[in-house]
Image (tube, helix red, strand yellow):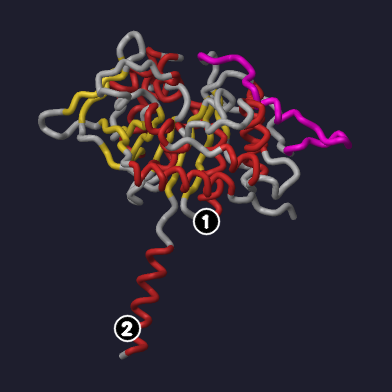
Amino acid sequence: MKQTLLSIFLCALSSLSQAAPVKLIFDTDMGNDVDDLMALCMIHNLQKRGACELLAVTITKDHPQAAAFVDAVNTLYGYPDTPIGVVRDGAAKEAGKFNLLADEKNADGSLRYPHDLKSGADAPEAVGLIKKLLAAQPDGSVAIAQVGFFTNLARLLDDPEGKALVARKVKVLSIMAGAFQTVHWDTRHLEYNVKLDVPAAQKLATQWPTPVVWSGYEIGVAAAFPHVVIEQDLNYIGHHPLKEAYYLYNPPPHDRPTWDPTAVLYALQPDRGYFDLSPPGRITVEADAATLFRPTKDGKGRHRFLVMSPEQTARVREAIVQLSVEPPPAKK
């Protein structure tokens, strides 16, 4: 009898530890801020543990080095074949401060961060890639984390087949955008990801057919990444892209807000108590990029935003730190 109970317990424990990985599409403006890179490091480290499956990285920064740098990071973490899609005719075309790391070379002429996608010009367009990937997934199985501009996903909605696939295949969209608790709920903070493509943000806010959870400006500011971690905890390899990118973007000492990692953390681990959620409601994007939340009377709105207590803020910061600095796999 004891053996039987033990077997039942071990089987139950095994089933809990083998939960299906979250299928994720990561939509990013890599290069506009180092928090995009923190988020990608987190994703890969959770992927190593079997907690998620990164279906693709899609990019809303319209510069060829962005895709090359993403491929370099994917390769470093052991996922060189992760599909990458890019925006065409996007809102942000400047190079960025750290995507140039994709082209950095060692003394012998080899790439510091090896990769085979040398330019975004050689990558597929993002909307077509997302459609292809969604079509191959079970219904209601995909999470999307959008941490850049709204361009790719708004264009997906312009495609009737794309919008239908979103409605069938996507379970949640977790986005870093807007501001909802800056001093007062009605404070009109004009958040960067919204400002760069307001028409796209408006389209997504009104037409996206699945639940949307917004991580506002105030969330990433509250859980800022400690600069001492960048300075001291990434020296286990000669060159680490997160350390080098952090210095190139804005050198320490400064604690960088964790805007994008918070949206990824919610997308991948929504049931861990890191965040609370606002009541259901509707978020509208005004012409000047202000984001306004209004609760719905029937409690059936598709939009919510993240809320954190001081205790949750400490947990979120530590989770992001640990998931960001975990070492990539050793080279074979």
Q: Is residue 206 left or right of residue 327?
A: left
Q: Position of residue 314 (x, y in %)?
A: 41, 45
Q: Which residue is mark 1?
A: 49
- Decide which of 297, 52 is in the foreground and name it: 297
Q: Judge left or right: residue 180 versus residue 249.
A: left
The stretch of residues the image draws in magenta is 91-113
Q: Farthest residue to the right: give it.
A: 108
Secondary structure predominantly adopted by residues drawn in magenta:
loop
Q: Is residue 312 above or below residue 259?
A: below
Q: CA distance from mark 1 to mark 2?
A: 28 Å
- The residue at the point 30 percent across, 25 percent down is 180
Q: At 71% across and 30% down in the image, what residue appears?
A: 101
- Residue 5: give its label: 2
Secondary structure under tag 2 reads helix
Quadrant housing the C terminus:
bottom right
Q: Residue 331 at x, y = what percent?
A: 73, 52
The quadrant in which the N terminus is found is bottom left
Mark 1 and mark 2 residues within 8 Å of each other at the beta carbon: no
Q: Is residue 90 magenta?
A: no
User: 250 or 16: which is nearer to us?
Assistant: 250
Q: Earlier in the sequence, mark 1 or mark 2?
A: 2
Residue 55, image x, y percentages: 50, 41
Measured along the vertical axis of the image, is residue 83 above or below residue 186?
below
